[in-house]
Image (tube, rainbow, N blue to C red):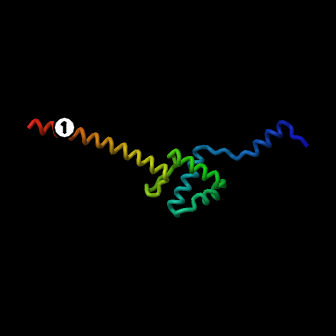
Amino acid sequence: MSLTMSNKKNATSSLRGKRYTLQEKADVLEFVDRYNAEHGRGGQTAATKKFQLSPLSISSWRKQAISRGTLPYHSPSANLPVGRMISQLQELHERIIEQEQVIQRLKAKFDALKASL
């Protein structure tokens, strides 16, 4: 029995899984991280059941988000995923550099004023 062209198209498209939007992925990953923060672990399993997803999909999304530093998460920094923590460290480093430049300018003004005495 041979498939007609339209049946072939339907057969191949039905073999593909559902495509998820970035927002749907972010919602799932946020659920996983919140669950892990509250319970210590088990977020991926809970998300698998709640959203009826493959654990491999969730794991893949988490790896991608961590590597990009875009993992959604809103809890204390001690529980942050590595990618997000690195992003925050970079932010803090940049703020420290800015403040050090402010201090250097203040010291220069102080020294100039002191020298004029």
Which residue appears farthest toward the left when viewing the image?
A: 117
Residue 73 is situated, as x and y percent measured from the top left of the image, at 49, 52
Q: Quadrant of the C terminus?
A: top left
Q: How many numbered marks have been drawn onto this rendered protein structure?
A: 1
| Residue displayed at 86% across by 38% down | 4
Circle 1: residue type: Lys
Residue 31 is situated, as x and y percent measured from the top left of the image, at 55, 55
| Residue displayed at 12% across by 39% down | 114
Quarter residue 32 falls in: bottom right
Which residue is at the front of the view, 53 or 109? 109
| Residue displayed at 33% across by 42% down | 97
Mark 1 surroundings within 10 Å by alpha-carbon count, few (fewer than 14), some (14 through 19), many (20 or more):
few
Residue 90 is situated, as x and y percent measured from the top left of the image, at 41, 45
Compared with residue 44, is residue 116 higher up or lower down, i.e. above or below? above
Residue 116 is situated, as x and y percent measured from the top left of the image, at 10, 35
Q: Quadrant of the N terminus?
A: top right
Which residue is at the front of the view, 104 or 71? 104
Which residue appears farthest toward the bottom when viewing the image?
A: 39
Disc 1 is placed on an element classified as helix
Which residue is at the front of the view, 108 or 28? 108
Report which residue position mark 1 lands on. Answer: 109
